[in-house]
Amino acid sequence: MYLEKINGPEDVKKLNLEELKKLAQEIRKALMNRLSKIGGHFGPNFGMVETIIAMHYVFESPKDKFVFDVSHQTYPHKMLTGRKEGYLYEEHFREVSGYTNPEESKHDFFNIGHTSTSISLASGLAKARDLKGDKENIIAVIGDGSLSGGEAFEGLDYVGSELNSNFIVVINDNQQSIAENHGGIYKNLEELRNTNGMAENNVFKAMGLDYIYENEGNDIKKMIEIFERVKDINHPIAVHIHTQKGKGYKLAEEDKEKWHWCMPFDEQTGETTIHFEDEEDYATLTANLLLEKMKKDKTVVAITPAMPGTIGFNRENRKQAGKQFVDVGIAEEQAVALASGIAKNGGKPILGTNATFIQRTYDQISQDLCINNNPATIVLNFTSVAGLKDVTHLGIFTISAFSHIPNLIMLAPTNKAEYLAMLNWSIEQTKYPVMILMPGNGVIEDGRIADKEYSNKNQYKVEEQGEMVAILALGDFYQIGEKVSKEVKEKLGFTPTIINPRYVTGMDNELLEDLKKNHKLVITLEDGILDGGFGANIASFYGDSNMKVKNYGLKKEFIDRYDVNDILKENRLTPSQIVEDIKNSLSIIK
């Protein structure tokens, strides 16, 4: 094997062309070995093997600096920079993250998991290089799907007009984002592909960059030649390459959307080897509700920034929705402002994406949406500690980040019935911007009946009346609250009050005041960081009283590739730990 002998880019340079082609085959085999067993980003990595081999053959990493957008296509890069064991041997899989990571290697410069950032980050490296008088190449790699992001435009605009020195932007054009591409720039990319880069209309030249095109992005020889042409260039240039997403695995070549990211699977059949007990999921439930509403009301419209799966809009559902489904591309700011405008003009917009990606829209949610108080609905997936676990994709900051924005109603449903009721109410109401947090602990049907109306803001729901201790269990931590209540009854001999707050963005002052009559301790549970969160507001309410308050949530920290149970224990979020704290607190209070 050639890959086993690659300990760094210097070893790549020792191989001849035929050996490099065999190395590409071995890299794809190693990708298959890892991805079929633990999952990850499939299509982007399979499509960029030859390009990344050529980059390391021509350039001098880490002196020459590579910045990969999103990191979706960096697995081959990792194999060639001393991390091949993480792909060859199962016992080492967990040692290598799915994203570039400076803690892993000197060949990685940023921990990157969000899109459209590489050009801007790399421009900073180039500016510092120029200030120091150094001469290394700076190479930003970006997928065509990421070009619709605002930061990518800002980066191109800057380097094309302000950076008069070496800067190489590699545009990996595989004609696919997660789903299909959306946006005007892709018409120009198509025109450039069809004319072999000779089209008069050229967005990159228009922004001040030099330009070169290579149609055979999966040809190592041609990629080496094109990188040798641009190496040590003294001005910014866009290297536009055409590649095949998922190359080398027929199923991925034929269904690029399905194979953008994958669960563990059987290599021969492509069938997922992990099966969940829950047949239902909130994405599918969301799509079903929205499609039914779309049939009856032409003003209902689902919006996503390149994340249609978040709200269950697969290809079939997108086709069924027609003009009532809008994918704005990787452009979260546009998605929020679009939703606000639709709501202002009498439409019923529902924006769906992952919590980690909505973080970049704080200004739009505050300014474009909430100051104007337009009744748009934002549905967020993976807001939970049990959601996405890479440090770049955490959703645990959602509550503390957005719950303080005036006019916004943030709702935290505790089961299936409540989620559907809140979503239905939000779409039909005309007074408030609403953010709904999808539960992260599965689709739960527990028989509790959900209210249909949520216009009476900040009214908590007492699920079981008790004494001594009140448990305010928010959202998908409600089930932890139920377990705490059960254990308190069994071990401490009394029935606590268990409350479903429902509203993250506000307090039920009347209920909280009433708890003072026959309760000594209030417990808050929230699936997010404690700093600036729901519990902090409750503690502040009781600050001038004798009520003791204990807040349970997560520490403010970046956590990466963690075990959920370990994190819960570290933050004393297991029922037994909480009951132990309750017992100790009551003994002190007495």
Image (cartoon, rainbow, N blue to C red):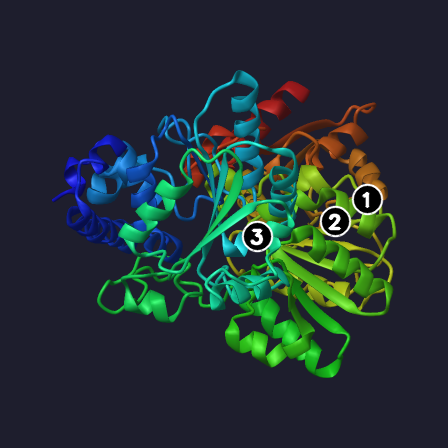
The amino acid type of the residue labelled 1 equals Asp
Label 1 to label 2: alpha-carbon separation: 9 Å
Q: Residue at x 24, y 31 (%)?
A: 10
Disc assigned to residue 284 = none
Q: Which residue is mark 3?
A: 147
Q: Position of residue 553 (x, y in %)?
A: 59, 34
Q: As displayed, is residue 58 above or below residue 333?
A: above
Q: Residue at x 72, y 47 (%)?
A: 501
Contact, mark 1 vs mark 2 (Cβ under 8 Å): yes
Can residue 490 be seen here? The reply is no
Viewport quadrant of the N terminus: top left
Choose between 195 and 106: the one closer to the eye: 195
Which residue is farthest bottom?
296
Q: Secondary structure at mark 1?
A: loop
Q: Secondary structure at mark 3?
A: helix
Q: Residue at x 44, y 40 (%)?
A: 564
Which residue is farthest left?
1
User: Which mark sits nearer the N-terminus, 1 or 2?
Assistant: 2
Q: Residues within 10 Å of mark 3 (few under 14, many from 20)?
A: many
Contact, mark 2 vs mark 3 (Cβ under 8 Å): no
Viewport quadrant of the C terminus: top right
Q: Position of residue 61 (x, y in %)?
A: 35, 30
Choose between 498 and 445: the one closer to the eye: 445
Q: Residue at x 58, y 63 (%)?
A: 188
Q: Residues within 10 Å of mark 2 (few under 14, many from 20)?
A: many
Disc assigned to residue 508 = 1
The amino acid type of the residue labelled 3 equals Leu
Disc assigned to residue 503 = 2
Front label number (1 vs 3): 3
